Structure formats: structure tokens, C-alpha cells
Image (spheres, helix red, strand yellow):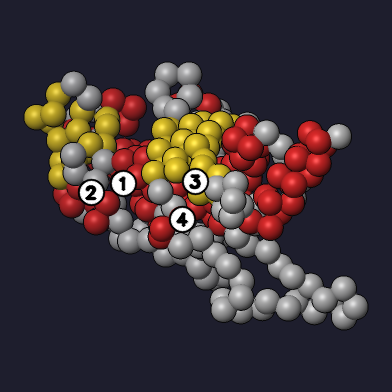
Amino acid sequence: MATQDLGTGCRTIITIVAADTLGIPMENIRLLIGDNRYPLSGASGGSTTSGGVTSSTRRAAVNARTQLFAKVAPALEAKPEELEAADGAIRVKGNPSRSLSWKEACARIGAMPMTAHGKNPDKSEPPDLTNSGVGGVQMADVSVDVETGIVSVNKMVAVQDCGLVVDVKTAESQVRGALIMGISYALYEEKILDPVSGRMLNPNMEFYRLAGIADVRELVVHMMTGKGYDERGVIGLAEPPVVSPGAAISNAVANAVGVRVAFLPLTPDRVLEALEQRGAHAAV
């Protein structure tokens, strides 16, 4: 399909879904993406891509599997609906001894290759394989040096619900990446513009501050999976976990020093200015 992988594990989840549906190892799947000669795909958006590509992959693989069942059913003396694909074989449900290896099954396709398509959304083929309503909660533990104004994030915890998680490792990695990005924009990243010309005054990594290894400490990610979550289908993930760190860190700083810093990033000068204002109000 003509989707792209922007580093969010798109290749992995497509291959997992296809392999699981066809009952063969992932290494037996040849994935072709990122070319407009392939079937149309949606735009690459972190909160929509996963649901779209896995849904269409699942439907196409099921359609191909159904065609294959029809081809091999006579050889297994069974009806197509009595067959299943598992462990690299096509076999009769409940009777694994009546089976054909994947290679043997494909040898019965004949001279004309099989072609199957799947699309998302497709409300005509229930159940709905995708959903909406991603949600989560994040908590931050911070330390604030009231003499220097430096904020340090000691620990961040993210609990994330994105429906059916196709691959836990890549999903958790995305949330951890979101936490790192959140720490970076909450504390360091700031675009400084010339008010007259509008030109950016810190357009390179020498002056545009990013979070480093020492700035990112303990990160804990918990994905909400299992009953009550998986039934919702695949829900996009990428952007939502990036939104919360700014609020979580800002609230933690306010709780620590007793005054809210009104702007991000929470730079030392802004923290010290807020502390000075608090002291002036207290004196009054």
C-alpha cells in the first residue's frame, strides 16, 4: 500500500497483522509501501495511520485467505468455512492432522494468481476494525531549585489507552518518545523571533536548546490492554501523549513552588520571575 513509515513502526504492525491473519511467520511476508504506484492510503498522521493500515491489511488478508480456503477445501474433504490458517498450514478446525502446508496449499492456486483487496473504512463489512477516542493520563515528579530557577524532571508516568495494541513494544516506545519530546518543549525548546523582521534568532542547535540524556530520567509507561480495551479496535496513538507533558510538568512546578509559571518553556528566568512576583504579593 502507498502508506509511509515515519518511524512509528508502521512496517511492523502491517506485517504482524498480515502474518497473524494468514497463519505464517512474519519473515514470510514481503511488504511494499511508500510508492504511489501502490493502492491508495491515507495521509501519514500518527493518530490515524495505525488504525487505517491495520484495518485494510486485515480485510485484504482475510479476503485472500478466504480465496485460498476455497481452493484447498476439496483436497481436505472439507468446506471452506471449516478451515483455518495457523502454524504455517491450512487445516481443518479441530483436526490438525487433516492439513496442507502453506506451500502445498499455494500449489493448488493454479496458473492465475490470487489478488485480494481490503479498504478502510468499510462499514459494509462488520465488525468495525478501527475506533476513535484515544485517552490517557500523565503524572510528573519534579524538583525546582528556587535559587537558580532550574526545573528537573525526576520521573514521569504515562497511562495510555489506544484500544487494541498491535505491538506493545512499539506502542510503548512511541509513548516514551512523546514523554521525551514533552519534557523538551516544556523546559527547553523556545523559538526566539525578532519582533521587527520576524526572523528566527536561534535557528540552529547551538542556541536552540533540546533535552539531553541527563534531562530525561525515569519514564514509566503503562498501556491499557485486555478486556474492555481490545474490543474497541485499533486507535491511533502518536500525537496525544505529546500534549500532556507540558501541563503535567507545569502543574508539578506550581505545586512545588506555590506559584504558576504562565508560559512554556519553564526556563530558569521565568521561574525566578514567578517566584519574585509571589514574594512581592506576599510582602503586600
Residue situated in front as seen by the camera: 236 or 122: 236
Pointer 3 or 4: first along the chain: 3
> How far apart, in angstroms, are the residues tagged by discs 1 and 2?
6 Å
Looking at numbered disc 4 in the image, what kind of residue is underneath it?
Asp
Secondary structure category for the residue under label 3? strand
Q: Which residue lies furthest to the left in this view?
A: 97
Q: Mark 4 points at which residue?
A: 215
Looking at numbered disc 3 in the image, what kind of residue is underneath it?
Val
Left or right of 22? Residue 123 is right
> Where residue 58 sits: x, y (%)?
44, 42
Left or right of 51? Residue 262 is right
Does residue 115 appear in the picture of this structure? no
> Where residue 47 sits: x, y (%)?
59, 46
> Any mark on residue 153, and which?
3
Please, is residue 80 above or below residue 63 in the view?
Answer: above
Q: Which residue is painted at 87% across and 80% down in the image?
A: 197
> Any mark on residue 19, and which?
1
> How far apart, in angstroms, are the residues tagged by discs 3 and 1?
41 Å
Find out whether the residues at labels 2 and 3 contact each other: C-beta distance under 8 Å.
Answer: no
